[in-house]
Image: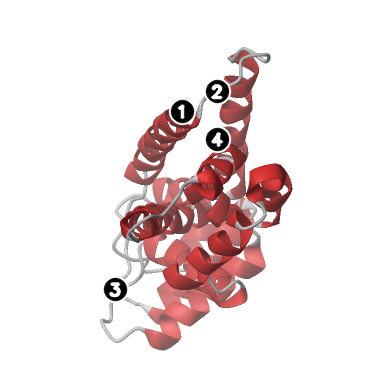
Amino acid sequence: MTRQEVKEMLMVLQAAYPNYNPQDKTIAVNTWYDMLCGYPAEKVNAAVKAYILSDTSGFAPSIGQIVEKMQLFCETETRELNEMAAWQLVLRAMRNSIYHAEEEFTKLPPVVQKAVVSPGQLREWAMSEDVDGTWMNVTQSNFMRTYRVEVARDKEMQKLSPDILKLISKTQNQNKISQPENKTLTVAEERKLAEQSATQLTGRLRVAYKRDTHFPAVQHAAVYHRL
């Protein structure tokens, strides 16, 4: 999204919300541009339109509310698996994972892979003996709890602009390069590493969203043309 497109979007908000009047319009344009420049203009404008058509509060949206609208579009396009459906995929993969864990792991959807952690975990589950049914119940419960966390994290990731996602991906790749290549991790070590990466990612998400600012509204559209 270009700076000019941001100005035009703010003019639309001004027309829909006459009381929308930032004290410093240059800062308003710069902030909205800084937050939204990584998104396609058509998606941002569609989110703005959706907000205006569904809003009953009478207040202009914050940046975060526009991003949330765009996230809803993504969720409509790619509906997530519920917890039980995800667990059924894991059970199916476990049946063939004693000797083919890597192959079965790659068949799982990305968010399910994150909840499982690694092919080694699939193999360990496949080799476990469920004598009284307790192990299966505990494993299912643990998986579903982890899966819920990963789904929630994916939703937060969808709110980030492509440029921030590229930065996070670059950082993760650098971390992988810095790790010893020939060391084989145990399942426990793989899970611990995954948890550490998730904690670091959550911290980066918080930092990114602290920059989200809500501005009150614009009186005159002509002001934006001079910015």
Q: Is residue 175 above or below residue 168?
A: above
Give whichever of 170, 162 is nearer the camera.
170
Mark 2, mark 4: which one is toward the viewer? 2
Cα distance in 3D space between marks 2 and 4:
24 Å
As drawn, the label of residue 133 is none
- Considering every residue shown, the one lying at the far left of the view is 57
Identify residue type, mark 2.
Leu
| Residue that appears at 43% across and 65% down | 68
Q: Earlier in the sequence, mark 1 or mark 3?
A: 3
Q: Amino acid at mark 1?
A: Leu
Separation of marks 1 and 3 at Cα, in angstroms: 50 Å
Residue 100 falls left or right of residue 227: right
Q: Residue at x 65, y 69 (%)?
A: 42
Q: Which is more N-terminal, label 3 or label 2? A: 3
Q: Secondary structure at mark 1?
A: helix
Q: Give the structural element (helix, strand or loop) at label 4.
A: helix
Q: Choose between 124 and 35: the one closer to the eye.
A: 124
Tag 2: Cα neighbours inside 10 Å, few (<14), some, or many (≥20)? Answer: few
The residue that disc 1 covers is: 193
Residue type highlighted by circle 4: Ile
Callout 2 secondary element: loop
Whole-number angstrom distance, CA of label 1 to CA of label 2: 10 Å
Residue 19, which numbered label?
3
Return the residue at label 4: 168
Look at mark 2 in the image and give the residue it sits on.
185
